[in-house]
């Protein structure tokens, strides 16, 4: 063969080879899965390091990590995740590029619901171990909206559908999905809350309710003969636009008979704010219970095609203490407590004072434990009083 023929043949072979490569690229080598075992003493992961704060009702994320020791026998890729316990879990993925004892750091995801110690299991192949994380209760600082308790033991767990705890910046509440209203709303009120911001009137659905739950829209009460009755009043949040707007979420509303809302309740709200202007701070809880009220269009048990229950009775309690710090410790047997329970109707005595009751009576009617974080003996005294000032 001449040189020319040899070159031609090589060129043909080269082109053919290249063409084959283009039409049938070789499959890249499969990524190697790392092989490793968790180091453990008994069933517990050894030398696990838990970092971050785990507070119930608070979404966790990149600051919440658990680092575990693994013994790598084959380098390669890995992806691991724990089971979900109490609403949260941990996971990690990536590459293990060195043999022997290495660390894998997993990142948390989810929301711890209930305070307590949670045990997570992690496994890879036949190797597994467990580690514990402690979720703590929400902090109850001075002026916390729930400083004196959680009357119905409401829970952040989304299966607590009719006693679902929502802790917001400007109030806290227990929500009933099936009633479409709060069971109760609790808030602290002091002079910092009172300013000159006008009513925002931006009634709107609460998009922070769990996915899939009916979100009562702003128009749900229209034409029903019942007012959109605030629990935390607009007038108690007038220091900033944000604070005032927060009171217009529909999770803060109940269908309230107009005379009840605009006359009796409104005057009581003014009376409580007057106590703040006089140098006091207040812890207030408002709630409602029962089925059926009488508004401007007569009696109704529900509105908005049955999605919102009209309560039969509406109550409120207020603990009044002079401005100061360490509020829990300043409540004593002489502390003024005000409690009312008023039927949800237009046929009422104009004075809220006519409806004053013992807190014990509201507890009996609702099954709640009000002021539950005060000592039992002190509750006994305060809850048996009827305000007469
Ligand atoms: Mn205080
Ligand atoms: Mn109580």
Image (cartoon, rainbow, N blue to C red):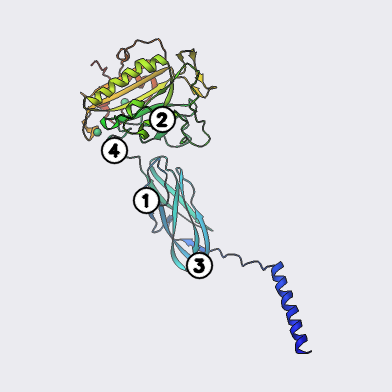
Q: CA distance from mark 2 to mark 1?
A: 28 Å
- Dot 1 or dot 3: first in sequence order is 1
In-image side of 125 versus 14 (left or right) = left
Q: Is residue 47 above or below residue 347?
A: below
Q: CA distance from mark 2 to mark 4?
A: 19 Å
Tell me the tag on residue 327: none
In-image side of 174 versus 139 (left or right) = right
Tell me whether circle 1 and circle 4 mark residues in contact (CB < 8 Å).
no
In-image side of 209 versus 359 (left or right) = right
Q: CA distance from mark 1 to mark 4?
A: 20 Å
Quadrant into which the N terminus falls:
bottom right
Which residue is painted at 71% across and 67% down in the image? 23
Residue 252: x and y in percent read: 41, 28
Name the residue that disc number 3 marks.
73
- Dot 1, crowdedness within 10 Å: few (<14), some or many (≥20)? some
Name the residue that disc number 2 marks.
174
Which residue is painted at 21% across and 30% down in the image? 323
Q: Secondary structure at mark 1?
A: loop
Quadrant into which the C terminus falls:
top left
Q: Secondary structure at mark 2?
A: strand
Does any atom of ligand 2 lie closer than 8 Å to the CB of label 2?
Answer: no
- Dot 2, crowdedness within 10 Å: few (<14), some or many (≥20)? many
Residue 380: x and y in percent read: 27, 23
Tell me the tag on residue 52: 1
In this orientation, does residue 153 appear? no
Q: CA distance from mark 1 to mark 3?
A: 30 Å
Tell me whether circle 2 and circle 4 mark residues in contact (CB < 8 Å).
no
Which of pointers 1 and 3 indicates the residue nearer the eye? Answer: 1
In this orientation, does residue 49 appear? yes
Name the residue that disc number 4 marks.
141
Which residue is painted at 42% across and 44% down in the image? 59
């Amino acid at each position: 063969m001449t040189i020319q023929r040899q070159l031609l043949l090589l060129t043909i072979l080269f082109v053919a080879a290249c063409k084959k490569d283009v039409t049938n690229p070789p499959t890249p080598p499969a990524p190697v899965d790392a092989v490793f075992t968790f180091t453990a003493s008994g069933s517990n992961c050894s030398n696990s390091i838990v970092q971050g704060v785990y507070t119930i009702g608070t979404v966790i994320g990149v600051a919440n990590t658990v680092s575990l020791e693994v013994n790598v026998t084959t380098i390669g890729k890995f992806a691991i995740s724990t089971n979900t316990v109490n609403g949260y879990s941990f996971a990690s993925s990536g590459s293990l590029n060195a043999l022997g004892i290495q660390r894998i750091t997993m990142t948390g995801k989810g929301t711890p619901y209930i305070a307590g110690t949670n045990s997570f299991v992690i496994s890879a192949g036949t190797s597994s171990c467990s580690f514990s994380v402690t979720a703590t209760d929400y902090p109850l600082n001075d002026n916390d909206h729930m400083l004196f308790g959680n009357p119905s033991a409401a829970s952040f767990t989304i299966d607590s559908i009719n006693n679902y705890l929502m802790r917001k910046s400007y109030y806290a509440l227990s929500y009933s999905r099936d009633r479409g209203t709060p069971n109760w709303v609790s808030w602290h009120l002091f002079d910092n809350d009172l300013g000159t911001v006008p009513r925002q009137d931006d009634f709107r659905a609460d998009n922070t309710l769990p996915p899939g739950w009916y979100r009562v829209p702003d128009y749900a009460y229209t034409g029903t003969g019942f007012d959109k009755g605030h629990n935390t009043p607009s007038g108690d949040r007038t220091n900033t636009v944000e604070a005032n707007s927060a009171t217009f979420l529909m999770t803060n509303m109940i269908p309230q008979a107009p005379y009840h809302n605009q006359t009796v309740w409104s005057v009581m709200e003014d009376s409580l704010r007057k106590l703040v202007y006089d140098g006091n701070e207040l812890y207030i809880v408002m709630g409602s219970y029962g089925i059926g009220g009488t508004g401007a269009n007569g009696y109704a048990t529900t509105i908005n095609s049955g999605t919102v229950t009209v309560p039969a009775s509406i109550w409120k309690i207020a603990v009044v203490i002079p401005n100061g710090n360490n509020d829990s410790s300043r409540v004593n047997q002489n502390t003024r407590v005000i409690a009312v329970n008023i039927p949800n109707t237009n046929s009422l005595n104009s004075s809220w004072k006519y409806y004053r009751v013992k807190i014990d009576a509201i507890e009996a009617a609702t099954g709640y434990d009000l002021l539950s974080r005060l000592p039992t003996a002190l509750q006994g005294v305060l809850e048996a009083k009827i305000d007469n000032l």
